[in-house]
Every structure is written in structure tokens, then in C-alpha cells.
Amino acid sequence: MRMQDLVELATSEPPPLRYGAEEILASGQRVQRRRRLGWAAAGASAVAVLGVVAAAVAVPALNAKPGPAPGVEVAQQPVSATAEPFTFTFGGYRVGKLRVEKPIDVSTAYQLASVYADGLTTNDKPVDPNEPAAGGPKLYAYLTVYRAGAYDPSKLAGAQQVTVGGRPGLEVNDQEHGWAARRTLAWQYATDAWAVIRASSDDAAFPSAKDLRDLAAGLPGVTPTPAKVPVKLSYVPAGYQLVEVAMHAMPGLNGIAVAREGDYAGLRYSNPALPTTGLTEPFGGEDGDDPPGSFQIFVVPAANSNQQASPGLSCGAGFCNRWDNGVNLQVSSGGRLTDTEMKKVLEGITLGNVQDAGTWTAVTP
């Protein structure tokens, strides 16, 4: 899609998105444009996706832990590669100037977490359009921890073999989409189980390949904790299965692109279920596309939505909304479900206390 097409998409639906054409053009990075376009592409809604699930998802309280100093061995709980789907198995941590946040997305095949760096700006939170844009170099980076057998390292083109914490790894360094440096590091953190850090930076020297290897070596395991969501669902269309859940975010890399937006939850359902082997990237890919056969549910603050609040249920082209005490619930299917089906999903949602994650419902396979 051309830049002009992206700008037209981001500005074509009333009311306007909070991220305008100037922001999109200023970034100059295709990956970060997803931050401004994700909701428009998912039914012109700036709300988080909240999918229909037999069980719901909440955010486990994983405290950030420091990573090991270079050259220092630190005993820690290994990351489980075989825990139940929709279960978080690693925590947030820091190594040097790089910081991995606790994971916010978990699927049948992987978990996702944002990666930040001291001195680099990550555009994943709302900004006041009247304030000057943040200066300095920018970073878009995330960590994907795949379940055993889910990732296929043989498909990582142009990779060089490296070692990460004594385990085999693969590394790709390139320049794409206007970034000064794009680095991909994949490593085997457990038997037949791989994790991947993807970092795109305006600073060609930071984070370096060594920085990413040091960060990877510090990955800490935690006691497996099920994801939770502030909703319960009584209806899911026949044949659809829950494949991904996000806590305080949208599912997939759209959620990573707006990780600090302040959303409540998102769920992705698919018919048939999405593959859990042979993967090279999260569902929907870097551009945040809707996988074929899928629909999503967003649960977000009304203030995060670019839809006009209205009583009852309302539908647009491929999506339907429900408003409940300052919360926007949306089902977005891109035309895969009829309005009747989407309304039935919304009518079957029981909304809990979005402000108290301790009361949310655990998601189970």
C-alpha cells in the first residue's frame, strides 16, 4: 500500500483518529504506521479488540526483574515452552539500557512483549497533537516467545549462526522501511522452542547485535499464569475458536504498536483455528492484518474510541459496537460475520470491573 493510501485510510472515517496524517508522515516508518492505522483497518474503531472467549483474560502481576550483568551467570527459573495456551510464562526484566516489559499478549502459539531502550523513543502511547513531537532517535522493538514447535527457524532468510547463553541462535541485520538498522535475533530458549527479538532503530549503532544477545540471555521464567479479561461471553459463532488474548491491549502486533494506549482487553477468534507450527511471525504479521477466517472483540475506554457513543447496539461496515458505562465493546469481523451474529456476540458479553484486574476471569484452553 502506498503512503498516500495509508494517509487516506487513516483520515477517511469520522470521527477522526487521534493520530493524524502529519504524525504518519513524520514517522517515516511503515511498522510504526500500524499504530495509527490499526483501528481503522479493523472497522474504523480506535477501541481495543475484545474477542469472544469461553473464558476471559486478565493481566498477571509480573514484576520487572533485572537481567544478568554481562559475563555473570544468574540462576533463574527456566521459561516453560509447554505450558497451557493463554498462559504467561516469562516476566519483565532489564539488561543495561534495554528493558522488556511483562507480556501483554498470549496465543495458542506465542507470547508478545514490548521492548524499550533508554535514550530512544517508542511511539506506542497517546500524544497531544498540540505538543511538539518527541525528538531524538526512535525504536520499535518487541519480543515473541514461541511455544515448543511453533517457530520455524529455517525460514529466517539471510541469517547468521550465533550463540545466546550457550544455546543456538540466528541473527539478521538489515535496513528496511527507512530505519537506520533493523535487527532480528532468534534463539532456542528450550528444546524445540524459540524466541525472537525484532528491533528497528533510528540509531544504527544501538541496540547493537551484542545488546540483543545480552538481552536474550537474560530472559526470566515465572510460574505459568493464565491470562485474564474483564468479560465473560455466552455466545460464540459455531466453529470459531479462541486463538489469541491481549491484556490491556489489542491482539497481535497492533497491540504492541499501541501498548501504552490504556485499553482493557482484546480477543481473536478464528474458524478454522490458526496454525500453531511453522510460524515466522505473530498472527496477522507485522502489518497487523486480520488473518483469514478471524474476528476480534475489543474492550476499551470510550475515550479511546473514534466511534460515536449511542444507545443500544450499532453497526458499521464489518463491525458492531456496544457502549457500557464508559466502555466501548466492539466486534470486528471485516464482513466475515453478519450484523446479526456480531450483535448476538455483543449481547452475550457480561462486562466486569475493568478497573480491577484482580476480579477478571482467567482464560483457559
Image (tube, rainbow, N blue to C red):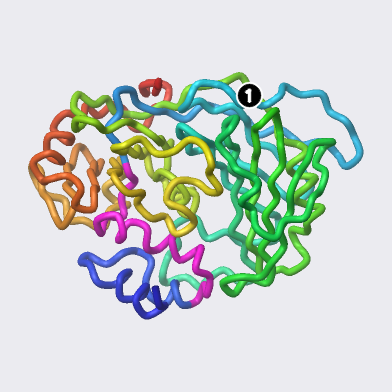
Quarter of the figure that contains the C terminus: top left
Dividing the picture into quadrants, the one containing residue 83 is top right
Dividing the picture into quadrants, the one containing residue 240 is top left
Spot occupied by residue 100 in the image (x, y as percentages of width and height) = 65, 43
**Residue drawn at 61 percent across, 70 percent down:** 176
Packing grade of label 1 (10 A; few <14, some 14-19, many >=20) is many
Verify whether residue 269 appears in magenta. no
Q: In this view, does 48 lie to the left or right of 81?
A: left
Verify whether residue 36 appears in magenta. yes
**Residue drawn at 65 percent across, 40 percent down:** 195
Q: What stretch is highlighted in magenta?
A: 26-49
Q: Which amino acid does label 1 sit on?
A: Ser
Nearer-the-camera pick, 257 or 190: 190
Residue to which mark 1 is pinned: 80
Compared to residue 225, the image places residue 343 above or below, namely below
**Residue drawn at 67 percent across, 55 percent down:** 184
Spot occupied by residue 117 in the image (x, y as percentages of width and height) = 68, 54
Outermost residue on the front side: it is 154
Outermost residue on the right side: it is 71
Outermost residue on the bottom side: it is 4
**Residue drawn at 66 percent across, 63 percent down:** 182
Spot occupied by residue 79 in the image (x, y as percentages of width and height) = 66, 27
Compared to residue 151, the image places residue 210 above or below, namely below
Q: How many marks?
A: 1
Nearer-the-camera pick, 359 or 192: 192
Q: In this view, does 333 lie to the left or right of 171?
A: left
SS assignment at label 1: loop
Spot occupied by residue 241 in the image (x, y as percentages of width and height) = 31, 31
Compared to residue 230, the image places residue 2 above or below, namely below
Compared to residue 43, the image places residue 49 above or below, namely above
Quarter of the figure that contains the N terminus: bottom left
